[in-house]
Image: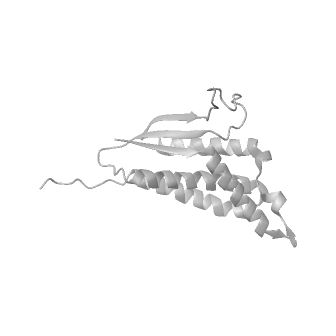
């Protein structure tokens, strides 16, 4: 049995932008709103790209025993050309696709939940790395939830469905 997990970089980064904007808007330092010093924006794409790659590497390390294939696809325009043909630049249209080989006792019902937990891992990991630069006390909180999300993914991968006896 195979399970396919897909994580969209643009969805993850949109959520990171929202989280960091919310934190910046609601946090004050010496009575001043810290929005501009905390919120991640498109100007920070190079750093966020590095954090995306770190999250991808940690994910593949944690799931390596089940990984059959990993691919990264990008959205192409109508002519078939890549929208961002220069691979050195951060491409927000990337989609990480992980194909997992699962034992027969794996419950396929878990795949959607695994995808959701892995998405949460990416968002919280990238947010924690960004917060480590902009607001260290917030970084611990998001790192904790990133770790919880990855533990949840691993637990679900090893959750086995009890065999059903024919009657």
Residue depicted at x 58% and y 56%: 146
Name the quarter where the C terminus is drawn: bottom left
Q: Quadrant of residue 139?
A: bottom right
Left/right placement of residue 51 relative to residue 155 reads right
Q: Quadrant of residue 24?
A: bottom right
Residue depicted at x 51% and y 54%: 116
Asked if residue 42 is positioned above or below residue 22 in the image, the reply reads: above
Left/right placement of residue 64 relative to residue 95 reads left
**Which residue lies most toward the front here?**
78
**Which residue lies most toward the left here?**
167
Asked if residue 59 is positioned above or below residue 147 in the image, the reply reads: above
Asked if residue 12 is positioned above or below residue 2 in the image, the reply reads: below
Q: How is the image coloured?
A: one colour
Q: Quadrant of residue 143?
A: bottom right
User: How many numbered discs, if any?
Assistant: 0
Residue 80 image position (x, y, % from top left)? 61, 26
Residue 22 image position (x, y, % from top left)? 73, 64
Residue 159 image position (x, y, % from top left)? 36, 54
Left/right placement of residue 121 relative to residue 167 reads right
Name the quarter where the N terminus is drawn: top left
Residue depicted at x 29% and y 49%: 105
């Amino acid at each position: 049995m195979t399970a396919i997990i897909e994580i969209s970089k643009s969805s993850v980064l949109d959520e990171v932008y929202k989280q960091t904007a919310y934190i910046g808007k609601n946090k004050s330092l010496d009575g001043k709103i810290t929005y501009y010093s905390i919120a991640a924006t498109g100007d920070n794409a190079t750093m966020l790209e590095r954090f995306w790659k770190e999250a991808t590497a940690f994910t593949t390390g944690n799931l390596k025993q089940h990984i059959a294939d990993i691919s990264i696809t990008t959205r192409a325009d109508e002519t078939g050309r890549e929208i961002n043909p220069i691979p050195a630049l951060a491409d927000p249209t990337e989609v990480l696709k992980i194909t997992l080989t699962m034992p027969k006792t794996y419950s396929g019902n878990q795949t959607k939940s695994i995808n959701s937990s892995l998405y949460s891992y990416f968002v919280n990991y990238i947010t924690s790395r960004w917060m480590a630069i902009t607001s260290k006390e917030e970084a611990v909180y998001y790192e904790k939830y990133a770790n919880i999300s990855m533990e949840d993914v691993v637990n679900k991968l090893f959750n086995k469905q009890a065999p059903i006896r024919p009657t």
